[in-house]
Image (spheres, grey):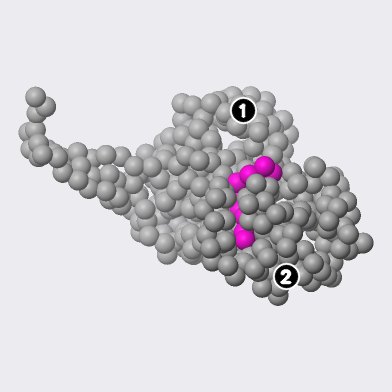
Amino acid sequence: MNVQTKPAENAAAIVAALGARARAAAAALRNATTDSKNKALAEGARLIRAESAAILAANALDIAAAKKSGMNEAMQDRLLLNAARIEGMAAALDDIRTLPDPVGEAIARWDRPNGLHFTRVRVPIGVIGVIYEARPNVTADAGALCLKSGNVVVLRGGSDSFHSSHCIVDLLRRALASAGLPEDCIQLVPSTDRALVGELLKAMDWLDLIVPRGGRSLIDRVTVESRVPVLRHYEGLCHVYVDRDANVDMARDIVANAKMRRVSVCGSAETLLIDRAALDTHFKPIADRLFDLGCEIRGDADVQKRDKRVQPATEQDWRTEYLAPIISVATVDGVDGAVRHIAAYGSQHTDSIVTDNEATAERFLHEVDSAIVMHNASTQFADGGEFGLGAEIGISTNRMHARGPVGLVELTTYKNVVRGKGTLRP
């Protein structure tokens, strides 16, 4: 692919050309066999492993530019590739290859008294645009998921990951060609010019769905400007609620993992809610572990009284996705207070309760209206791979079509097949 980092001379023409190639490729991919798609995925995984040095060299260019621009450490962590993360990309392609192909699956059948037989069958959505920031592994995950689900994908990665994404897409396109599929099943917008994003958002004549994945400013722009349907991956303002009936050691370990395992992912816990009845028994062990791990704690007045190391929390802290080793801590009055706090400040992404009281847990799971709700588990499990989906194209916080990790099934729609016997409507 011919790519450039300078401003595009004719953004509309570039996007129109992407669309023409995407539609042509979609016609072929829609009818591709599972074997041919799996062959492309297997070759893609092989190439990612074989060309890891090239991927790392491209990523080094992105990291150098990020450091020069003053990018913060959390965002650099999202951008960074290493041997383990490259292997993770390849393994995700292998996992997706082994999953059942959803295309053609009959999801419902019924008959009518007039003799008509109805079948509802899964089909690809068509052409999907994915707009994302920083994380180059999204390039491989989105490409692989769209391919297996029969969708052509047009990727617009962030300028920060431009060289990494370009290298990965080139490998995936080589894999497509080796399997006899059109290379244009996976395309990368060939410029970092933001004008092309605006053109993509207007491409109703060939683009069927836009999936934005990034910070709030990106999501808000796409939501406001897009004329194409949007599947939103909103910010991960995730909560862990520690109940009065929580096991102290379990609560300490879950909070530490939820916050500090990897602070730059959307499933990282940003707010700890602690039952007022558990404040004197549970907070200190949790705080000690967090401080030992290098986490800053910002708390309300009751929390600050229990530990002088805690910084004062402001109203804005309850609304902040830090993506950094910082956590806000609020005291709440039982599960009712936790539910109210999450409803007021959460992003409906992922929220977890720690408790040994099954009745309390069920209330939380029922009343918290988030895409993912958990009991006695770290919010860092908010990941398509951990759900057994192979990978994810994002964590949807939408209310229509898909919620939570978006995998193969969520990238399909359906059509209704009706069979008659010369049946006429009176």
Return the residue nearer the eye: 79 or 408. Answer: 408
Return the residue nearer the eye: 367 or 211. Answer: 367
Local packing at callout 1 (Cα closer than 10 Å; few below 14, some 14-19, many 20+) is few
Local packing at callout 2 (Cα closer than 10 Å; few below 14, some 14-19, many 20+) is many
Residue tagged 1:
224
Q: What residue is at 66 percent from the left and 53 percent from the top?
A: 338
Q: Quadrant of the N terminus?
A: top right
**Quarter of the image where one finds residue 310:** bottom right
Disc 2 marks a residue whose amino acid type is Arg
Q: What residue is at 45 percent from the left and 48 percent from the top?
A: 410
Mark 2 secondary-structure assignment = helix
Q: Quadrant of the C terminus?
A: top left
Cα separation, mark 1 vs mark 2, equals 41 Å
Rendering coords of residue 116 (x, y %): 13, 39
Rendering coords of residue 228 (x, y %): 51, 30
Q: Determine whether, in the image, residue 15 is placed left or right of residue 3.
A: left
Disc 1 marks a residue whose amino acid type is Val
Residue 24 in view, yes or no: yes
**Quarter of the image where one finds residue 6:** top right
Residue tagged 2:
252
Q: Determine whether, in the image, residue 67 is placed left or right of residue 394.
A: right
Q: What residue is at 48 percent from the left and 59 percent from the top?
A: 389
Return the residue nearer the eye: 54 or 152. Answer: 152
Any mark on residue 135, and which?
none
Q: Which residues are magenta?
A: 343-353
Q: Is residue 232 above or below residue 376?
A: above
Dots 1, 2 in contact, CB < 8 A: no
Depth-wise, is mark 1 or mark 2 nearer the camera?
2
